Amino acid sequence: MTSTPFAATLTTNPAARTAEQRDAILADPGFGNHFTDHMFLAEWTPDTGWADGRVVPYGPLQIDPATAVLHYAQEIFEGLKAYVHADGSVWLFRPEANAARMQRSAQRLALPELPTDWFLGSIQALVEADRAWVPAGGEKSLYLRPFMFASEVFLGVRPSQHVTYSVIASPAGAYFAGGVQAVSIWLSTEYSRAGAGGTGAAKCGGNYAASLLPQREAAEHGCAQVAFLDSTEQKWIEELGGMNLYFVQSDGSIVTPSLSGSILEGITRDSIMQIGRDLGHEVVERRVSIDEWRQGAADGTITEVFACGTAAVVTPVASLKWEGGEAVSGDGQPGKVTTDIRSALVDVQYGRAEDRHGWLTRVS
Ligand code: PLP
Ligand code: COI
C-alpha cells in the first residue's frame, strides 16, 4: 500500500520544561545530552503504508523484549541540524539530501522507504512544536535525529512487518569536548568499519556498533576518532567512525576518498566539493592510500587534513597516529584552507552568506 500524504496530530507536553530550565540547558548543551519536549512518531505496515503521524510528549517507548530491532539491528538513522538566523527564522541545510539518503539506507536494510514529504513534514512539525529549543548564538544548533526501526514482535529472521519512524531533537554545541580545535585520529589496523557488499554506505546503527571497539582503542591512545581502511587490501583510506575526510595538497587542490560503496556519502562532504570549487580549489575524488597520507604529511605534499560531517562540521585533523608512529599534518594547527572552508560552510548555514546553491529550507 502506498502511504497517504504527510499528516500529523499534535499532543502538547503538559510537563514541558520551564523557560528557565530550557535556558539553562541551551547555555551549554554539549552534544547529544539533552532532548526537547516533543518527539515525532509514525508507523508502517504493509497494509497501511506510512500512517499515524504524531507529535507527542518526549518520553520512553515501550518495547516488547521480542521486538525485532533488539535482536537483528534492522535500524537506520539520519542526522541534520536546524539553525537560527539573525532575524530569528529557523532553517535546515539540504534536508532533501538526508531524505534521499534515508531512502537509500532503507533499501539496503530492507526497511520501507519514507516518502520525502513525510521526512520533511515530520521535521517541520517537530521544529514547530519545539521552536523555543533551537539555540541561537555561537555555533549552536538543534540537532535532529530521524530514525526508523523494526518494531514487529517476532523472532524470525525476515524484514519486519511493522516499522516505527521517529524524530527526536537535541540542542547541540560542539561535537568534540574541546570545541573547534585540531584533533588526533587513530588508525585502526586490526578492524574495518565496512566491507564490499556490506552496509558501509547505509546509515545503519550496526555500522556504529562495529566502530565502538576501535573507537575505544582510539580513545585509549588519546585520539578523538578512528580512521578506517578498506577491508580488502587494508590500504585505501575510507573515512572516520562518524565523519568523512579531506586532504589539502600543497598545489592547492583538495582531495577526498572516492565513494567505494563502503563509505557513507556525507552531505557535508558533498557540500564541501562545491564550496571548495567556489573558493577556487581544484576538488578531486580519488582513492588515497595510507602510504600517501604518511608520506604526504612527512614531505609536505599534504598540508592540511580535515574531517567533516553534520555533527563535527569541519574539524581540523592535527595528526594520524598508529602503533609506534604519527603523521602530523602541516604544523599540527588548524590550516587556512580548512578554516576558510569551515567559515564558508557555516556562514551559509547561519544565513551570514548568500545561499548560492539553494541549500537552505525555512522551517520556522
Ligand atoms: N561518515 C559517517 C560514518 C557518518 O556517520 C557521518 C555523519 O553523518 C558522515 C560520514 C558525514 O555525513 P554528513 O555530512 O551527511 O553528516
Ligand atoms: C552526524 O554527523 O550526524 C552523525 O551521525 C555522526 C555521529 C554523531 C554518529
Image: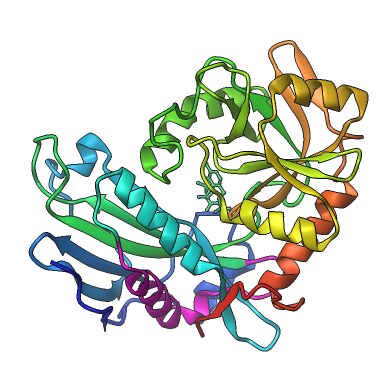
Q: Residue at x 23, y 67 (%)?
A: 42
**Image quadrant in which the N terminus is located:** bottom left
Residue 351 appears in view: yes
The colouring scheme, among rainbow, by chain, secondary structure or one colour, is rainbow
* Relative height, residue 18 to residue 347 (above, below): below
Q: Give residue 198's quadrant in the image.
A: top left
* Relative height, residue 36 to residue 335 (above, below): below
Q: Nearer the viewer, residue 165 or 97?
A: 97
Left or right position of 271 against 125: right
The dominant secondary structure in magenta is helix
* Relative height, residue 59 to residue 109 (above, below): below
Find out whether residue 138 is within the magenta segment.
Answer: yes
The boundaries of the magenta stretch are 114-140
Q: Nearer the viewer, residue 6 or 184?
A: 6
Q: Residue at x 31, y 68 (%)?
A: 115
Q: Nearer the viewer, residue 301 or 144?
A: 301
x, y percentage for residue 23? 57, 74
x, y percentage for residue 47? 7, 64
Find out whether residue 207 is within the magenta segment.
Answer: no
Q: Give residue 16's quadrant in the image.
A: bottom left
- Count numbered badges in the picture: 0
x, y percentage for residue 40? 32, 70
Q: Residue at x 50, y 55 (%)?
A: 33
* Relative height, residue 231 to residue 200 (above, below): above
Q: Give residue 93's quadrant in the image.
A: bottom right
Left or right position of 27 against 170: right
Residue 145 appears in view: no
x, y percentage for residue 205? 38, 42
Residue, far top: 324
Q: Residue at x 62, y 39 (%)?
A: 258
Left or right position of 61 against 359: left
